[in-house]
Amino acid sequence: MSQGVSKLILTLTGLLCWTLSGAQAGLGVEGTVKDFLSRTDLGHFSASLETNNVAYVKDQKLGFSGPEDSFGSNSYLKMDYVNGRFSAGMQLESYLPALYGFELGQQPDVKKFWLASKYIRWNSDWFTIHVGDIYDQMGNGLIFRSYEDRNLGFNNSLEGIQLSFNLNDWFSIKGLYGRPRLYTAYAGSWVRGASATVSFNDIFGWDSVLFNIEGNYLNRYESLGKDSLIDFGTLGLEDPNLHSYSAALNFAWNGLSLKAEYAGKTKDLYAATAPKAKKGAAIYAEAIYGIGGFSASANFRIIDHLGTMLSLYGNGTGNTLNYLPSLTRQYHYLLANLNPYQVNVEGECAAQLDLFYTLRSRNDRNRYWIFRVNGSTAWTIDKGQTDDGSQRMLWLDVSADAECHWMKQLKTTFLYSRQQWSPSHGYEAESYASNIFVADVQYKFNRKYALRGELQYLYSKSYERDWIAALVEFTFAPQWSIYASEMYNLGETKKHYYNAGVSWSKGKTRVQLSYGRNRAGYICSGGVCRYCPAYTGVNLLLTAVF
């Protein structure tokens, strides 16, 4: 075992023991580090630890070959310090190796243990300076968003400097410059940009109205390299500078919220597999309204070759400079998430409508009902996207559900979803359709014990045809929870996908141990997806905040 691995194990073990011993003493970290810092006026320290570990098991029925290493581990230790206007922090990460299916584990230069991000920041009344790794976005993220998502193994922070100025109550401007992170290294590109916001409600003194406009500009520079194996000239790309820009507005008044943005960019390769460099553009609009027990939201977006990579020499989900999530409902039920939609960056026209209504009993505050109707769809926009030049549907989902609180102890949820999608991303006329039915029942015996069960059925005449799924979860509040789930294909494969686990929580520490078989497919978070191959294994997850 290498010294780096040994030190990491000792560090993680020490942190865990320190946390648990503090909790047993009734102190936690609040009674140790935080109290010490407050007594000595040295500021405020906070930290969080997350470690996700899987021991893979050979599964002949699954046809599982698995990774070369039968063990995977992703760990993150984040530490922050604040003292008045000054703050600093860093995040250590380890992949020993990376969990199976994470793209960062497939990189040739992957590091096992490294300082992944770091920053120092100073805030004054009218300006902020940030040096280190930057997490931010411009507008709605159409041209730029840097963020971390551990479920996806995604982190595209910008290592550099950011300056923000609030020149008065109604005008602010910020600029940034740096190199983007690409998995466990940094891309060969450099990114620089500026954003300015004007607040009209502050100019005119409107107390009940929010109205501002925002203008953004972003430049990505990367050498086209004459010694590269890629002939960028043949692909139609000759300028090493990519120029992106956008204009956005935000309006809110009396329960109504409106957002709109237009974005564009100069010629670029919108994906690693793009056959030709093209200009890109996008339009985004959002409306939200709520009154009493009713609320509605609508989203509309047109994307035309607006996918932007961190580096022209990279690939994968993590090689993304902007944020283009799918405009679809995010489910937490197994069968409703069986075949999620992935955005077509070559071009799509997408829309989503969400309606909520809450009905409450006048005689019993514990009795109320929440009704929801959702519809989302996406279509091709370019004749070259289909084999016959026609416009075709990429995705369609219409769902309705009712969450019923019958009494303090009993809650039920019933969901129906009709999903239809194109396996060729619209190129061919064929599409698959499925009808998903879900019944979810929860009963609380008392404040400590609760039982929840799910029964799901998917009916389909295409692809793998019918599925059935079930879940049972028993909670011993506030510390213990036990669950078991099963998903079985009644159609083509006849395979079982089972999972069972137990979790324990105390204070801000949580430990979960589970075992199961996982189906190959897309795992999505916030509308962004990554592909994960099938595997069977034992999973140990630890999270702690101190």
Image (spheres, helix red, strand yellow):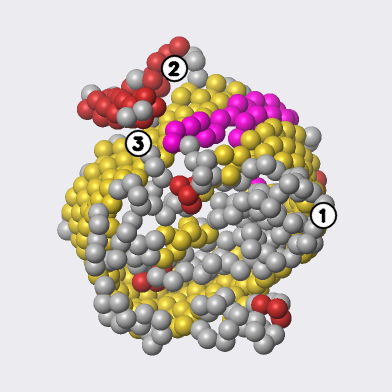
Other residues around mark 3 within 10 Å, as few (<14) / some (14–19) / many (≥20): many
Does the magenta portion include 194? no
**Quadrant of the image for the N terminus?**
top left
* Left or right of 81 on screen, residue 336: left
Residue plotted at (35% across, 62% down): 534
Question: Label 3's element?
Answer: strand
Image quadrant in which you'd find residue 284: bottom right
Mark 1 and mark 2 in contact? Answer it, CB < 8 Å. no
Question: Label 1's element?
Answer: loop
Does the magenta portion include 128? yes
**Quadrant of the image for the C terminus?**
top left
The residue mark sitting in front, 1 or 2, is 1
For residue 117, above or below residue 441:
above
Name the residue beneath numbered marker 2. 37
Task: Return the x and y of residue 87 as percentages of the image width and height.
Answer: 57, 26
**Res. 215 visible in picture:** no
Name the residue beneath numbered marker 1. 238
Name which residue type carries label 2. Answer: Leu
